[in-house]
Image (cartoon, rainbow, N blue to C red):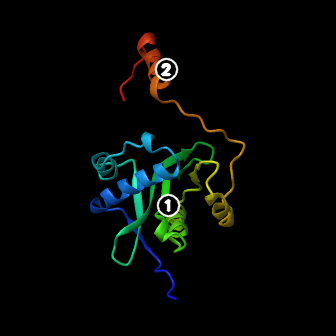
């Protein structure tokens, strides 16, 4: 029996975008919400490879340089610590590549970026039933149970935004 090939982690390249988009849709399927995922290759390419990107990505690739996993992330900022951190938006490893260390290596790569750049945190959220909770605990990640996530989207987002127009306080972006 041969052991699985340990993937290589590298920054995402433009040619990786279709595979990453496909995996984002696989993640949406896994999280039982495929109808909510509308990401296109054009959108992701624009976000990752703009002149001043606000989104960054790494891929886990197999021995043929084919992506088998990804991490998409962006910078956040802690006003208390006074430094940036990384917020991991999505991490996914295709089922066939699970158990190869790809997920751990993707997280280790982001942890290394944090340490080298002087960032103090690597944050992420996950759906409460995800079995990865045990893995995250095994690497020392702490569940932030005292923090509750909130989101504005759709009609509620538009209704709140209308208050700017009503109040006449719109500023330049």
Which quadrant, please, contains the C terminus?
A: top left
**In the figure, residue 172 lies in which quadrant?**
top left
Is residue 144 positioned above or below 8 on the image? above
- The answer to whether residue 152 shows anywhere in this view is yes
Q: Which mark is residue 79?
A: none
Residue picked out by circle 1:
117
The residue sitting at the bottom extreme is 1
Residue that appears at 34% across and 70% down: 66
The residue sitting at the right extreme is 146
Q: Name the element at disc 1.
A: helix
**In the figure, residue 138 lies in which quadrant?**
bottom right
Residue picked out by circle 2:
160
Q: Name the element at disc 2.
A: helix
Count numbered badges in the picture: 2
The percent position of residue 102, horizontal first and vertical second, equals 50, 70
Would residue 23 be found to the left or right of residue 102 on screen? Answer: left
Residue that appears at 64% across and 64% down: 135
- The answer to whether residue 88 shows anywhere in this view is no
Q: CA distance from mark 2 to mark 1?
A: 36 Å
Mark 2 neighbour class, 10 Å CA radius: few under 14, some 14 to 19, many 20 or more: few
The percent position of residue 145, horizontal first and vertical second, equals 71, 45
The percent position of residue 19, horizontal first and vertical second, equals 34, 60
Please state which of residues 77 and 140 is positioned toward the viewer in this rendering.
140
Residue that appears at 43% across and 40% down: 35
Please state which of residues 165 and 139 is positioned toward the viewer in this rendering.
139
Mark 1 neighbour class, 10 Å CA radius: few under 14, some 14 to 19, many 20 or more: few
Q: First in sequence: mark 2 or mark 1?
A: 1
Q: Between tags 2 and 1, which lies in front?
A: 2
Mark 2 touches mark 1? (CB < 8 Å): no
The percent position of residue 76, horizontal first and vertical second, equals 51, 47
């Amino acid at each position: 029996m041969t052991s699985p090939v340990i993937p290589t982690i590298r920054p995402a390249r433009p040619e990786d975008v279709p595979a990453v988009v496909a995996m984002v849709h696989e993640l949406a399927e896994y999280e039982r919400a495929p109808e909510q995922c509308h990401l296109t290759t054009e959108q992701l390419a624009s976000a990752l490879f703009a002149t001043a990107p606000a989104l960054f990505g790494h891929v886990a690739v197999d021995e043929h340089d084919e992506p088998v996993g990804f991490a998409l992330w962006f910078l956040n900022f802690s006003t208390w610590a006074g430094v940036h951190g990384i917020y991991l938006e999505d991490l996914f490893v295709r089922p066939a590549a699970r158990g190869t260390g790809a997920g751990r290596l993707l997280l280790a790569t982001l942890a290394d970026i944090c340490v080298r750049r002087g960032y103090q945190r690597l944050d992420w959220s996950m759906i409460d039933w995800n079995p990865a909770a045990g893995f995250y605990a095994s690497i020392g990640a702490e569940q932030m149970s005292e923090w509750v996530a909130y989101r504005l989207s759709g009609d509620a987002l538009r209704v709140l935004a209308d208050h700017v127009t009503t109040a006449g306080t719109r500023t330049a972006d």
